[in-house]
Image (tube, rainbow, N blue to C red):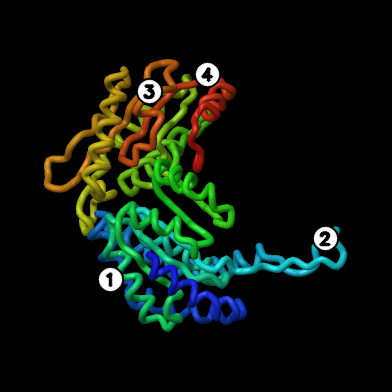
Amino acid sequence: VAAACEAAAEASLDWARLRIEERYEALQGLRGALEARSAELAEAILLETGKIRAEAEGEVKALLGRFAMVRAAVESDLREGPVPGFPGEQLRYHALGVVGVIGPFNYPLHLCHAHAVPAMLMGNAVVVKGSDVTPLCAQVYAQAVEESGLPAGLYNMVQGQGDVGAALVTNERVRGICFTGSYEVGRRITEAAVARPELLVALEMGGKNTVVVAEDADIRQAAHEIVVGGYLTTGQRCTCTDRVLIHRSRRDELIAALAPMVQSLRFGDADDPHAFAGPMTTAAGRDAFWTACEAATSAGADAVVAGGRLDRAGQFAKASLHLLPEGCHHIEGYTDRELFGPDVSVETFESDDEAIAVLQASPFGLAN
């Protein structure tokens, strides 16, 4: 980590002196190198995460589209020049220098790339640590960087577990840190950054995302959106739907629509044309997911669609759907944590105010 940060600090000096148009042109070399390795990148994603091929290929396509998207955002957001209300004052932007990026396993390329590209476009060098679950993804991406023609030291990859991430956060060369992952790790990063006011910290730590289905809802459409939101990528998305609040008068309709859809979901191998999604990525994640679902049924939740193991090799889990008891909006170990697996809980409410109160009582946000 220390060597990577030194290389980044050295590379950032000349890079920051370039005009943004020159940096964007240089980054097109990276886009071309990624495009040339598209098949290899997708293969690495599906081998390490278990995603179906269509999802893996979709993630790679998103990498290629990110460059133009970032350029458009920069042109829209950055306004250099006179400061309104302060005659004679000028607004200018300066690169931070070295930006560290720590990524998760579920989108091992997209959620590092989405920080690295804007950081580099704005004149910074980066040190990227992907998930220790997906080291091949990080390696193939770094090989594309080597072939891209970008200056040496501008993009640096480090591999390892939590101690490597901690070393990146505390390295004095690093002036910005972008993290996507668990709340526990994000909290430790925040604590480590308290004594470093010069460090810009950006954290995205998942959610317990809730859908509110109101009294006048189109139940068929709502059910479709809930299933896509809750079970795509085997529920391993920070934006996935975990909870559903349904008006009591429409509960039975929604359950009747959801249950057969959830029962029909097929989890299979990457090239299975009938697979909706693949296995869970880690055994630890799968086991924690099952423990949470067991907490729900132990507390009285009705397993409308029971989950559990699929009778096959690998870390496959069945999709499940739980209906909480009337008036229940909290089950310890279930409603108070991100499950990161293929399950949705259904809770009833009587009024909009009650539904809003349930949302406000949750410490999670992100994608309600």
Q: Which of 174 and 95 is in front in this view?
A: 174
The kind of secondary structure element at disc 3 is: loop
Residue hosting label 3: 331
Q: Contact (CB < 8 A) between labels 4 and 2?
A: no
For residue 312, above or below residue 22:
above
Residue at position x 24%, y 41% in the image: 286
Q: Contact (CB < 8 A) between labels 2 and 1?
A: no
Q: Which of marks 3 and 2 is nearer the N terminus?
A: 2
The kind of secondary structure element at disc 1 is: helix
Amino acid marked by disc 1? Glu
Amino acid marked by disc 2? Pro
Q: Which of marks 4 and 2 is nearer the N terminus?
A: 2
Q: Nearer the viewer, residue 81 or 250?
A: 81
Residue hosting label 1: 40
Mark 4: few, some, or many residues within 10 Å (few <14, many ≥20)?
some
Residue hosting label 4: 350
For residue 84, above or below residue 344:
below
Horizontal and vertical percent position of residue 108: 35, 58
Q: Which of marks 4 and 3 is nearer the N terminus?
A: 3
